[in-house]
Amino acid sequence: MKKLQRSIYFITFSMLTLSIGLLSCDGGGGGGGGGGGGRPSGQTTTIRGNVESIVAMAPQNNEPSMLAKIKDFFTLSKTANAQDNQIVVTFIVDGQVVDVVTVEPGGDFEGVVPISFSGNTATLVFESDGDEESVVIFVPPVDAVIIVVLVDFQGNEAEVVDTEFEGPLHCENVTISLVAEQDDDIVINGNGGPCVLAGNCHLSFDAANVIFQDCGGCFDARGNSVLEVFADGDIVCETNDCAITRGTSSVALSAGDEINISCIDARGNSEVILNGASCLIGSIFEVGNATVGTDTGCPPLL
């Protein structure tokens, strides 16, 4: 498992709020439908994690809990403390138990949950010596979700403090919205493929910073897909490969600071709109009736 490091390399949002709605299939026009990009129902996604079990007294006299006190000092680069008691993790999707695993002495655990085109909500129940705490996470259609969880059994608290999506995020004929908590980032690691592959779907990100890394292109929007990326800070695509739009797809990138993409390849009747304090785009290709433009506030493209 890749080493997780807070606020440096990987995603750092605590919990996702999500909106999932099925859309009717529209064959998409001119230059690419949604086929070939999704993860069919019945496949699975791996959830790998590390749990920090906190031994602490429950909060008294309105004092903040131990979890709240240490959260700001918690760093993911440290090795998890060995657990004094065995911890069992139960994975629940749609009210059904889909996996049960035991946390290793170092705090690592790994389970498997079913996944659909629109993603699933999974409840993870942590049990130790008769005490139970749980967290709820959104599992989008990716290869793996990697999380770090703080669990305070005595203080009756549990919280996901860091998450990474591993493998391309594929969406098809659905609406998926990923919203990070304040000051937290969304990072998607494409493992060499397109970080986002959208086929006739509506996908939105909203975070402090949105970072696409190890991508074969930060996004590939097909058919009539709509991709919206909002960042208070930067939108960064860490690859030399082109981001691609096809068909009648629409991509809107809005950043409070910088939009940094090495290449945009717009095809068909697609549209890309950039709105940021600065737009650092290495090269732009417009094929057919496709357009790449800047909204108010974004200086001329490089």
Image: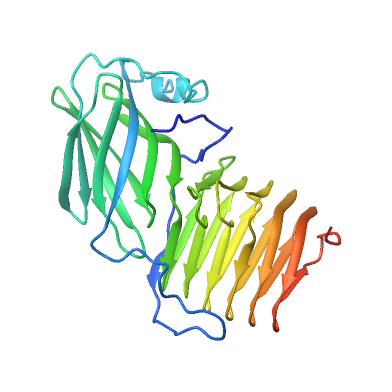
Residue 256 visible in rendering: no
Horizontally, is 195 left or right of 93 in the view? right
In the displayed structure, 205 sits above or below 148; it is below
Question: Residue 36 occupies which quadrant of the picture?
Answer: bottom left
| Front residue of this view, candidates 35 and 137 | 35
Task: Provide residue 137's location: percent of width, then percent of height.
Answer: 35, 46
Horizontally, is 179 left or right of 86 in the view? right
Residue 131 visible in rendering: yes
Colouring style:
rainbow
How many numbered marks, from 0 up?
Answer: 0
| Front residue of this view, candidates 222 and 87 | 222
The N terminus sits in image quarter: top left
Task: Provide residue 237's location: percent of width, then percent of height.
Answer: 64, 51
Question: Residue 106 occupies which quadrant of the picture?
Answer: top left
The C terminus sits in image quarter: bottom right
Seen at 31% across and 53% down, the residue is 121
Task: Provide residue 223's location: percent of width, then percent of height.
Answer: 52, 78
Seen at 59% across and 57% down, the residue is 217
Task: Provide residue 254's location: percent of width, then percent of height.
Answer: 68, 59
In the displayed structure, 271 sits above or below 165; it is below
Horizontally, is 224 left or right of 233 in the view? left
Seen at 53% across and 61% down, the residue is 204
| Front residue of this view, candidates 133 and 301 | 301
Question: Residue 111 occupies which quadrant of the picture?
Answer: top left
| Front residue of this view, candidates 296 and 153 | 296
